[in-house]
Image (cartoon, rainbow, N blue to C red):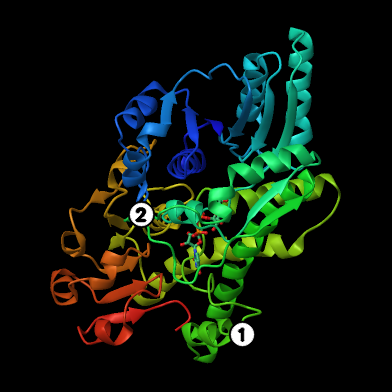
Amino acid sequence: MNTVIIGTGYVGLTTGVALAYVGHDVTAVDIDPSIVDRLSRGEATIHEPGLEELLHLAQDRLTFTTELPDLSGETVVVIAVGTPPKENGDADMAYVDVAARQIAERIQPGANLVVVNKSTVPIGSARHVEGIVRRTLRERGVEATVAVASNPEFLAEGRAVRDSLYPDRIVVGSDDEAAVEVLRRLYAPLLEQAFEPPPGVPRPDRMPLPPLITTTATSAELTKYAANSFLATKISFINEFAGLAERVGADVTQVARAIGLDDRIGTRFLHAGIGWGGSCFGKDTRAILATAEGYDFPMPVVQAAVDVNYQQRVRIVEKLQEHLKVLRGTTIGILGLAFKGDTDDLRDAPALTLIEVLQERGAQVRVHDPVAMDNAQALEPPLDVTYATDPLDLADGCDAIVVATDWDVYRQLPLDDVAAAMRGRVLVDARNLLDPDAVRARQLRYVGVGR
Ligand code: UGA
């Protein structure tokens, strides 16, 4: 099926490559010529396991371009542009509006188009986009069949290819039955899992076929915010219990496992630590709070999840303070900058808050990350930190080290050498990643979260 995707960020690129891999002809449009150039050469523009391999495997069905092509015949156009937060937390629709107008300008007479909102957009956006397209078509005097559907994306960074090929469910919100049928055909290879898994991203064992959930457009839009708010709340919940566990002398990792095995609760997203970051949870919780405020409807649960999350970051600095007493003049090493492992993304990364608060309190900061260093060095204004070449170099002269990102490589820290290189003895495991006994065996003081 002829598919056009506008925007080649995490969502647009991964979706486009996955749809091409399972057999569709995909044109992916981005305004940035350098991105289009790199993608056309088969180079992945984001760090995402398995993406470059898939890009190569699907290259015959993939075209990257800066120009939206003419839209004729039966075509699915996916809007996957950014919706950054505005001052008040609302999602900014400016890029979506531009995409909608461009689509309408390219529609050819007689075309049968399904426009899909995949960007995370405010409630009511499907109708809003439909309005823009219809108005522009009327101005142009062009007759075509156009339906708009909301199709939220649930992929997580670091596992985006896997989530795209092997989704838990696909949600399509539209009041137009014909549009739903077109999208059912678009997603048929994923719904039926009728494709050979790429070697690098195998199909999970005993994976059940994902259901297609059809809803109204508004329900689909709200589903996206509800999913992210729920996951963010689940993490804040376990982080709150981590704080209490520290006071009563319990181990929150044991508690999380023990409650998670109740399948009404589930084990995932119960990992206590420095709290959540990234481009989605913070943005989407703020956006839904702003929406609710517009309806004069308080959402204290989501608000609490946000507040607990910020406190969790500050709590890590307080732990350092408890053990080092005076932070001014100390050197603190931060292992990991990305907001989570397996990504080079620094958006709303907890490590950046740590750096800021530590510097406010007069500490010198050394940092390391296995993949996000280039992105960190490109930040504006620049970070006033020392970039270490590896974890051992980071440890050199540190009074304390904080593990701030759950990178797999940090599980195998050369603890003997790290301990020898440090000036102080404190290791704050802000991701509960390390074995406390192994750390203590090196005469280091292990400080976890809730354990
Ligand atoms: C999140 C959702 O998981 C996706 O389903 C959604 O599609 C995406 O947002 C989006 O809206 O685009 P993402 O932000 O990429 O995905 O990453 P997550 O794996 O959800 O992690 C978010 C943050 O929570 C990270 O900082 C992670 O370290 C933290 N986290 C996660 C915890 O602190 N504890 C946990 O148990 C799990």
Q: Residue furthest front?
A: 194
Residue 332 vertical placement versus 382 (above, below): below
Residue 122 placement (x, y as % from top left):
72, 41
The reply to whether residue 124 is visible in this rendering is no
Q: Are marks 2 and 1 in contact (CB under 8 Å)?
A: no
Direction from residue 167 to residue 57 in the image, left or right: left
Quadrant location of the C terminus? bottom left
Q: Is mark 1 within 8 Å of ligand 1?
A: no
* Residue at which label 2 appears: 337
Report the front residue among 353 and 347.
347
* Residue at which label 1 appears: 262
Three-letter amino acid code at the position of disc 1: Asp
Q: Quadrant of residue 132?
A: top right
Give the mark, 2 or 1, whose residue is nearer the N terminus.
Answer: 1
Q: Residue at x 45, y 52 (%)?
A: 195
Three-letter amino acid code at the position of disc 2: Leu
Direction from residue 250 to residue 335 in the image, left or right: left
Identify the mark at residue 324; answer none if there is no mark.
Answer: none
